[in-house]
Image (spheres, helix red, strand yellow):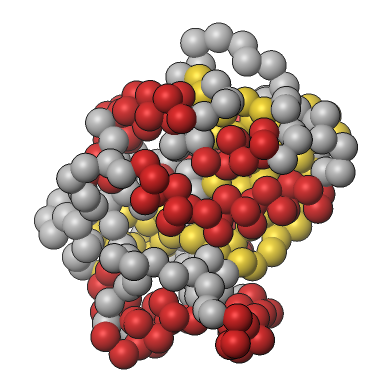
Amino acid sequence: MKDTCNLCDSREFELLKSELRDEKTGFKVFRCRNCNHVQLLPRPAEGEDREFYNKNMQDKNRQKEIDYEKLRINNKCDTARRVKLIKELFQNNTCSILDVGSGYGFFVNELYNSGYKNVTGIEISDERRNIANNHSSVQIMNFDVNNPDRNIGRFDVVTVFHVLEHISDPIMFLAKIRNFVNSGGTLICEVPNLREALLDSCEEYNNFYWIRAHVNYFSRETLLDCLKKARYENVETRFEQRYGLINLCSWLTTGKPQIETPVFDICDAYKPVEDFYRNYVKSNGRSDTLIAIARL
Ligand SMILES: [Zn+2]
């Protein structure tokens, strides 16, 4: 079990990266020779995943104190983009929405403030959920998709933003989530894009990219494969770009991200250049983010 592909159960792999950014021993990154899926090995057990998130390890590996306001500002562009997508796809704001892995609740809160009042969030990390519930109008519940302890019903829209890359059995996870989607409903799934151009053009970025928290690294093809195996038949994909031109320039010139003073957009004078850059990487499938929209 521990050394099999997360998507096809094959045991034939090639090594892709021998060291993670934040954990130098214990895990390596491999590509499955059968289905091309890229993942960490050995495969963490499901219980290990839960322990990792319940202790909020992901942020603690990054920084010591949780600064809610700083996180909110850093997430502002993602939050606005995701709310815009919901508004584009679902004009009826009475639709019921479940957000899986709500984290600090930025997205559900912004949706609520935009008029979508039928919003529910679930989050397994006690610490994140407590922080979210102290700041948010939307109640975020303690509910583990992998170990459901009650029936939470079905929803018109289920969003899963940057969760699937963390899950050691993504097919089973998506199959369980399918039970929460109404007939005629929609699943929206966002993950980092393995085909991101910067991975090939900046060695420092490549060394920074692979982390213990991400057990899966999806391309458009492997994400579609994963959804298909979880019985989602009608799937559309889109490419998105989270980070802007200034972040790209920072990596290419200094070998470092824009983390201290995050800038996600360029000043107005150069806006057309930013738009061109984003549209360029989106149109050739080399952007940093991948979205799947599955209709049931
Ligand atoms: Zn495979």
Q: Is residue 41 left or right of residue 246?
A: left
**Residue 128 location in percent, x, y?**
37, 32
User: Relative to the observer, which residue lies in front, 46 or 260?
Assistant: 260
Q: Who's the residue at 34% across and 71% down the image?
A: 258
Q: Is residue 218 left or right of residue 83?
A: left
* Residue 122 in view (yes/no): no
- Does residue 109 sit above or below 207 in this rendering? above
User: Relative to the observer, which residue lies in front, 276 or 183?
Assistant: 276
Q: Is residue 49 left or right of residue 104?
A: left
Residue 125 position by quadrant: top left
Q: Residue furthest left?
A: 25
For the C terminus, the image quarter is top right
User: Relative to the observer, which residue lies in front, 190 or 9?
Assistant: 190
Residue 259 position by quadrant: bottom left
Count the labels in the image. Answer: 0
User: Relative to the observer, which residue lies in front, 205 or 14?
Assistant: 205
Q: Is residue 237 left or right of residue 30?
A: right
**Residue 1 location in percent, x, y?**
34, 39
* Residue 295 in view (yes/no): yes
**Residue 284 location in percent, x, y?**
64, 82
Q: Who's the residue at 31% across and 90% down the image?
A: 253
Q: Who's the residue at 55% across and 34% down the image?
A: 100
Q: Residue furthest top?
A: 150
Q: Who's the residue at 64% across and 76% down the image?
A: 282
